[in-house]
Structures are given as structure tokens and as C-alpha cells.
Image: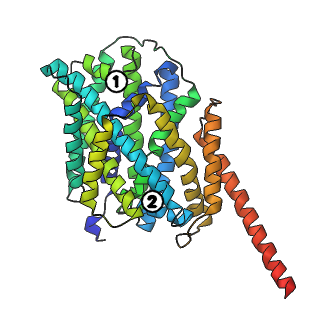
């Protein structure tokens, strides 16, 4: 790959900042409002620090190996071991595409209703889905420049939104509901983790390891934390956790429409594009552009039926699966420096990840202060180290037995 086609740190910063600036992030941040202002801010920043560090480390693997995320995972899990992650990633990306389009359509429905008297839900879904497909189709044709400009505009509009939030009320209002600090921390960790199967799709073209790590880390940490805080502050100052209702009350007119559309497109095109790259990890039989059209249509169709009341459970499912799996990938790559890409399966790694997933859900019900991701990772790595020791010990014993027989 020529140097001219490599991606600079600022472009990665803009890419991931744009990915983080979305209605889904605002909505998730608003769910933390029952904690209050101080604890909510701590949960947002601490959770994003943990999640984004893991996210950026996975990106370094893609940079060094010059391969997409799912192909990089073969180094640890083996060729077939990467397939379950690929299938899960396609499912979660279709889910995210649907969620983003739903949130966009609901917001546009409220805004166009007040501006033009139009209350359709289906039309905004189809319109935004079309824009997302066009954005994804032009990803390989200099879209980074357009995306950088869009993200800069989006950041400016988000500042206007934050100003409107803070001017909307003089005091913080209590928000009804119940959420533990551990659950709030977990909701902040999960969001960057959800991008782990995607990050190397973009860091593989980075110019340097430093640009790959810090561009991705800073872009997503700042963007996502900012969006969470807007959601948190909106809920506390407006007295509601409904971001759509908040946008409708701000009287921002066309600025709100632009925020909603740009926030959706600059995030959701990544979901569509990366679902294509993930599919190509499974099979190379289809063309990239054809797959972009297929996944855009599937995500748009799913948006008409996705049960949004299961949104929190959808997030927890992502954390339960991806945190253990990628902790194995990180340990193998940075500590053991193993390369299992020529093997079919890493049985020990997959077994440890399964234990980690079970641990995640068990800990989730305990509402620990440290959330579920950190205990899940600790258990996963501990089990993996034990299984590796046992495997090496049994292998040594077999060799000793063979030598004795000789």
C-alpha cells in the first residue's frame, strides 16, 4: 500500500469522533441520569477510559499486521475460530444500523412534525438509509475528506446543542428511575467495545502506530464521552431521559435536523461498511459494492421492526461476547506473541471466552461497582492461563512418556 493511501492520525481521530457523535450515545448517556450529575460524569469518563483503551489496543494489532479486525483475530483464535466472531459482528452491526435509523427517524419525525407538519416514520427511515448507503459506497473514493468536514460541522452543531441544553433550565432536576453505578459504568464501557471488531478495518491503513492508537483513542473517547454527557445533562436539566423529546423542546429548527442526519450518517455508514468487510472474512465470493447494497437494505428493513425496548439488553449482549473474546486476542498477541492463523481452532481460548461470557452475566446481576466487563476479562484471562498451563504440562508429560518408551 502506498504512503499516499495511508490514513493519518487526524483522519482516524475525525473518523472515530464522527462515529461516536450519534443519537445512540446521547440516548445511552441519558439512561445514567438517575445517578445524578457527579456520579454520572464519573461513570461516563471512567467507563470510556477502560473501554476505549481496550478498543485502541485492538486497533494496534490491525496496524501492525495490516489486516482487518476479524482477520487479525485469526492470529489468536485460528481460522475457524474467527468465524463465530464474524457472524456475531454481522448481527450486531445490522442491529446497530437498525437502531441508528430508528433513532434518526423518530427524531426527524418529531422535528419535521413541528416544522412542516410531517409525522411519517417510514419515510425518514428510507431517506436516511439511502444516505447511509451512498456514504458507504463512496468510502473508498476520498470520502475521508468529506467525512472530516462533516465531523467538524457536526462538532460545531453539537456545541450549539449543548449550549441549548444548559440554557434550557436553571437547575438540575431529579430523574425518576433506578440504575446502579456499576450498571452505569458498564453502559459506558460497552459502547467503545462494540467497535472492536471494526477498528482494525481502518487502522490497518494508518501511517504510524502512534497515529493509530492516539487518533482512534482520542477521537472516540472525546466524541463518545461528549455525547454521553450531552445525554446526561439533557436528561438532568430537562427532567426526562427521552433525547427525542429533548431535541423537540430545544426549538433549534434546521440545526437540529442537520445534527440528527449527520450524526446518523457519519456513524451508521461504518456499521454497513464494516459488515461488508466482516462478510469478506467468511467468503470472498461477493463484490464489496453489492454487499454494501445488501446490508443497507437489510439494516433499513430491520429498522422498521427492531424492538427498541430491548436496547439495554442488546448492549449487554455485546459486552458479554466481545470483552472475553478480545481479551484472549490481546493476551495472545501482546504477551505470548502466538500466531495460530494456520490452525483451525484455539480451543483453550474459545473455552476461556465462553467462561468469561457466563461470568459477565453472573456479575451483571450482582451490580458490582466495577461493572461486569472488568471481572469478565479477569476471569477469562485467568482461565486461559490455566488451560494453557495444563495443555503445556500434558504435552510435556506425553513427550517424557514417549522418550521413556524409547
Q: Is residue 377 visible?
A: no
Side of 307 where 337 appears, left or right: right
Q: Position of residue 139 (x, y in %)?
A: 24, 55
- Please state the total of marks drawn on the protein image: 2
Residue 173: horizontal and vertical position, in percent?
Answer: 43, 12
The type of colouring in the image is: rainbow
Q: Residue at (31%, 33%) from the top-left corner?
A: 102
> In this view of the protein, can residue 287 be seen by the observer?
yes
Q: Quadrant of residue 268?
A: top left
Instruction: Report which residue position mark 1 lands on.
Output: 243
Residue at x 31% of width, y 19% of height: 245
- How far across and how far down the image is residue 17, in percent? 34, 43
N-terminal-most mark, 1 or 2: 2
Instruction: Specify the quadrant of the image occupied by residue 96.
Output: top left
Numbered circle sitting on residue 355: none
In which quarter of the view is residue 23 placed? top left
Q: Classify 224 as above or below 295.
A: above
Q: Which structural element holds mark 2?
A: helix
Answer with left or right where residue 138 lies relative to residue 352: left
Q: Nearer the viewer, residue 331 or 290?
A: 290
The N terminus lies in quadrant: bottom left
Label 1 to label 2: alpha-carbon separation: 34 Å
In the rendering, at what x and y percent does residue 123 appear? Answer: 19, 32
Q: Which residue is situated farthest in the right direction here? A: 404
399 w.r.t. 35: above or below: below
Q: Secondary structure at mark 1?
A: helix
Residue drawn at (84%, 79%), measured in percent from left and top? 401
Which residue is tagged 2?
Answer: 70
Name which residue lies at 19% across and 38% down. Answer: 127
Mark 2 closeness class: few <14, some 14–19, many ≥20 residues within 10 Å: many
Query: Which is in the foreground here, disc 1 or disc 2?
Result: 2
Label 1 neighbour load within 10 Å: few <14, some 14-19, many 20+: many
Amino acid at each position: 500500500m502506498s504512503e499516499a493511501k495511508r490514513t493519518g492520525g487526524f483522519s482516524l481521530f475525525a473518523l472515530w469522533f464522527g462515529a461516536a457523535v450519534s443519537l445512540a450515545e446521547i440516548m445511552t448517556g441519558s439512561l445514567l441520569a438517575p445517578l445524578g450529575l457527579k456520579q454520572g460524569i464519573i461513570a461516563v469518563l471512567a467507563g470510556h477510559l477502560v473501554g476505549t483503551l481496550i478498543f485502541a489496543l485492538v486497533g494496534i494489532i490491525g496496524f501492525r499486521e495490516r489486516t482487518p479486525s476479524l482477520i487479525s483475530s485469526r492470529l489468536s483464535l485460528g481460522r475457524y475460530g474467527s468465524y463465530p466472531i464474524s457472524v456475531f459482528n454481522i448481527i450486531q452491526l445490522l442491529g446497530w444500523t437498525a437502531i441508528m435509523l430508528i433513532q434518526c427517524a423518530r427524531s426527524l419525525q418529531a422535528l419535521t412534525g413541528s416544522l412542516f407538519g410531517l409525522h411519517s416514520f417510514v419515510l425518514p427511515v428510507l431517506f436516511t438509509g439511502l444516505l447511509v448507503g451512498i456514504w458507504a459506497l463512496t468510502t473508498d473514493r476520498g470520502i475521508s475528506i468529506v467525512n472530516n468536514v462533516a465531523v467538524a460541522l457536526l462538532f460545531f452543531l453539537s456545541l450549539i446543542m449543548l449550549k441549548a441544553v444548559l440554557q434550557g433550565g436553571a437547575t438540575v432536576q431529579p430523574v425518576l428511575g433506578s440504575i446502579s453505578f456499576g450498571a452505569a459504568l458498564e453502559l459506558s464501557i460497552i459502547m467503545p467495545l462494540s467497535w472492536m471488531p471494526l477498528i482494525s478495518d481502518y487502522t490497518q491503513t494508518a501511517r504510524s502506530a502512534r497515529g493509530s492508537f492516539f487518533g482512534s483513542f482520542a477521537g472516540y473517547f472525546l466524541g463518545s464521552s461528549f455525547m454521553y454527557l450531552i445525554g446526561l445533562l439533557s436528561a438532568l436539566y430537562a427532567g426526562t431521559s427521552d433525547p427525542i423529546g429533548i431535541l423537540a423542546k430545544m426549538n433549534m429548527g434546521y440545526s437540529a435536523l442537520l445534527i440528527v442526519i449527520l450524526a446518523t450518517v457519519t456513524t451508521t455508514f461504518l456499521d454497513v461498511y464494516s459488515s461488508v468487510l466482516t462478510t469478506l472474512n467468511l467468503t470472498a465470493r461477493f463484490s464489496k459494492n453489492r454487499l454494501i447494497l445488501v446490508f443497507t437494505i437489510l439494516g433499513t428493513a430491520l429498522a422498521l421492526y427492531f424492538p427498541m425496548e430491548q436496547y439495554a439488553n442488546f448492549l449487554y449482549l455485546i459486552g458479554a461476547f466481545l470483552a472475553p473474546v478480545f481479551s484472549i486476542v490481546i493476551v495472545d498477541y501482546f504477551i505470548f506473541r502466538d500466531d495460530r492463523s494456520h490452525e483451525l481452532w484455539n480451543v483453550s481460548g474459545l473455552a476461556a471466552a465462553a467462561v468469561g461470557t457466563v461470568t459477565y452475566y453472573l456479575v451483571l446481576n450482582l451490580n458490582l461497582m466495577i461493572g461486569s466487563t472488568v471481572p469478565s476479562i479477569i476471569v477469562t484471562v485467568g482461565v486461559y492461563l490455566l488451560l494453557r498451563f495444563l495443555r503445556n504440562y500434558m504435552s510435556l508429560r506425553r513427550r517424557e512418556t514417549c522418550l521413556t518408551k524409547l
